[in-house]
Image (tube, rainbow, N blue to C red):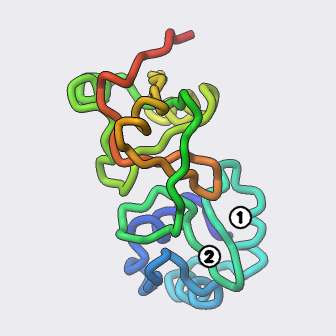
Amino acid sequence: MIESRYLSYLLRHHPEAIGLHLDAGGWVDVTELVDALGRHGRVGNREDLEQLVATSDKQRFELRDNRIRAAQGHSLDVDLGLEPLAPPAVLYHGTHPGARLGITTQGLLPMGRRFVHLSADVTTARTVGARRGDPVVLQVDAAAAHQGGHPFYRAANGVWLTDHVPPALLSTLAQR
């Protein structure tokens, strides 16, 4: 069976690990992907990929016209073809306590990814932040960031993306 985490690794960061080549939009042919996975000991087929895409809780992947790609989260230089959008007035970012000092001084940066990832709701941000312990949830004044010239995009899975959020536009929500 094909695992979501491994597929994310391949389609977001290291397609070359199994000999894949993504196009400029991050897409790869499903047959090519399944064949490459098989050559590397990962058994699966198109139906497995369709099931993974349909049941992924975070909707990490897009499947279209016999091609698949990661919806967001790339460290690779891919063009997702997203149009800039005005974001909601407030968005949220979940992180861990160890990142707090850096965020306080530099704001939110993409780090090893192409964009900063933001959530439209506190629950999702808390879930994201909890991957590495007790979460810290930051409230983002997205309206002010947008007015200040930071472009915003919404990925196919609903995750909001931007290049940077200055520290002055962040506040920490009370933890429960």
Please tell me how many numbered marks the rendered image carries: 2
> To which quarter of the image does residue 19 belong?
bottom left
* Residue farthest along the front direction in this orientation: 147
Work out whether mark 2 precedes mark 1 in sequence or the reverse, and give the earlier one.
1
Identify the residue at image location x=54%, y=43%: 86
Around disc 1, counting alpha carbons within 10 Å, would you say few (fewer than 14), some (14 to 19), or many (20 or more)?
Answer: some
> To which quarter of the image does residue 1 belong?
bottom right
Residue closest to the eye, 7 or 42:
7
Query: Which amino acid type is marked by label 2?
Result: Ile
Identify the residue at image location x=21%, y=25%: 105
Left/right of residue 6 with respect to residue 162 in the rendered view: right
The kind of secondary structure element at disc 2 is strand
Image vertical order of residue 127 relative to residue 26, above or below: above
For the residues labelled 2 and 1, the Cα–Cα distance comes to 9 Å
**Residue 98 percent location from the top left of the image:** 30, 26
Query: Which amino acid type is marked by label 1?
Result: Val
Q: Quadrant of the C terminus?
A: top right
Around disc 2, counting alpha carbons within 10 Å, would you say few (fewer than 14), some (14 to 19), or many (20 or more)?
Answer: many
The kind of secondary structure element at disc 1 is helix
Left/right of residue 110 with respect to residue 44 in the rendered view: left
**Residue 9 percent location from the top left of the image:** 46, 64
Residue on which disc 2 sits: 68
- Disc assigned to residue 67: none
Residue closest to the eye, 50 or 73:
73
Q: Determine whether label 2 and label 1 are within 8 Å by CB.
A: yes
Residue closest to the eye, 163 or 11:
163
**Residue 68 percent location from the top left of the image:** 62, 76
Residue on which disc 1 sits: 53
* Residue farthest along the left direction in this orientation: 105
> To which quarter of the image does residue 99 belong?
top left
